[in-house]
Image (cartoon, rainbow, N blue to C red):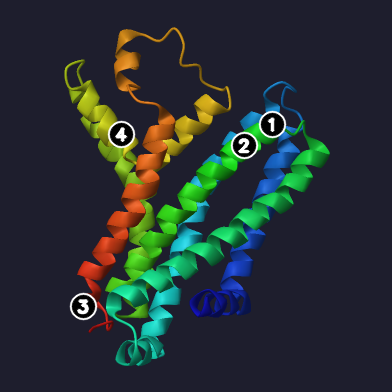
């Protein structure tokens, strides 16, 4: 509990989190205003998908910077060293730090979406089930990129390294990974489609967007071609659960493995 309270005070006293929340609120309010001209039946769902597409570009950068600098600050101010010499092992320190960052940042950003829900309710035909699907996806999104930021904060030794690592990771995840898929797309055949599907949906952004499209009623899974049926061979809820567990778990394990890249040490 001490870690959560300390993390809450550090994040709320800093300007970065409030600036990120402000940008997120402002950009989303513009999308809500634009969606007032959408058709009434699926206009709300189309707006949610547009908000997700916008989040896909800005939210990873926001939370990676916040999470990574939170960990880096512990090393810079030597508070991690004090804790490690008294009662904590590196594993328990990283576990408690990860849980506190996840709880605080996820709660604050999800709280911002509840504020936005008031605008959605006021100006659009609000559908609670669709909004809950959206919140579930955003929660998974935050869990993964918070943990990615924690990993970067652990392995980087200087602020310059950390800034560069955040920007390069954001560029790779958002842009370069899709370019790699486009490069290999001509080699996909019916025989290797299952393998391609696994690789494609283990990219959490692909899975989250497809989950939203299907659960918001914007993409139907009925009357699909044989190739499409083989491509979507598993329920998107299962893929979403796999991504929600796999990537945070893997990144936490890597943070422990490469902890000597920073100053956190036993």
Name the residue tied to disc 4: 200
Question: How crowded is the residue under tag 2: few (<14 C-alpha within 10 Å), some, or many (20+)?
Answer: many
For residue 87, which quarter of the picture?
bottom left
Name the residue tied to disc 1: 44
Mark earlier in primary sequence (3, 4): 4
> Dots 3 and 1: beta carbons under 8 Å?
no
Q: In whole angstroms, how far apart are the C-alphas of marks 4 and 1?
A: 27 Å
Q: Please tell me which residue is depicted at 75% across the width and 41% down the height of the picture.
A: 120
For residue 92, which quarter of the picture?
bottom left
Q: Marks 3 and 4: which is nearer the front?
A: 3
Q: Which residue occupies the extreme right position in the image?
A: 122
Q: Marks 3 and 1: which is nearer the front?
A: 3
105 is higher (above) or lower (below) than 191: below
Q: Please tell me which residue is depicted at 39% across the width and 61% down the height of the picture.
A: 147
- Residue 172 visible somewhere in the drawing: no
Which mark, residue 48? 2
126 is higher (above) or lower (below) than 230: below
Name the residue tied to disc 3: 260
Q: In whole angstroms, how far apart are the C-alphas of marks 1 and 2?
A: 6 Å
């Amino acid at each position: 509990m001490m870690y959560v309270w300390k993390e809450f005070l550090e994040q709320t006293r800093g300007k970065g989190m409030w600036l990120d929340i402000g940008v997120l609120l402002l950009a989303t309010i513009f999308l809500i205003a634009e969606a007032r001209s959408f058709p009434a039946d699926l206009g709300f769902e189309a707006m949610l998908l547009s908000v997700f597409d916008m989040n896909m570009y800005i939210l990873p950068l926001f939370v990676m910077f916040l999470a990574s600098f939170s960990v880096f600050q512990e090393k810079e101010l030597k508070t991690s060293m004090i804790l490690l010499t008294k009662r904590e092992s590196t594993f328990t320190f990283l576990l408690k730090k990860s849980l506190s960052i996840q709880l605080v940042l996820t709660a604050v950003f999800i709280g911002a979406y509840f504020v936005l829900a008031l605008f959605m309710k006021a100006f659009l035909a609000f559908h609670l089930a669709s909004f809950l699907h959206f919140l579930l996806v955003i929660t998974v999104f935050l869990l993964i990129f918070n943990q990615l930021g924690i990993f970067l904060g652990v392995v980087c030794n200087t602020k310059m390294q950390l800034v560069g690592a955040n920007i390069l990771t954001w560029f790779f995840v958002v842009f370069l990974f899709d370019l790699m898929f486009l490069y290999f797309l001509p080699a996909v055949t019916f025989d290797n489609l299952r393998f391609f599907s696994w690789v494609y949906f283990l990219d959490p952004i692909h899975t989250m967007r497809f989950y939203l499209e299907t659960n918001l009623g914007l993409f139907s899974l009925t009357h699909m071609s044989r190739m499409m049926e083989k491509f979507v061979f598993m329920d998107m809820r299962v893929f979403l659960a796999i991504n929600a567990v796999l990537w945070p778990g893997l990144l936490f394990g890597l943070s422990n493995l490469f902890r000597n890249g920073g100053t956190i040490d036993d």
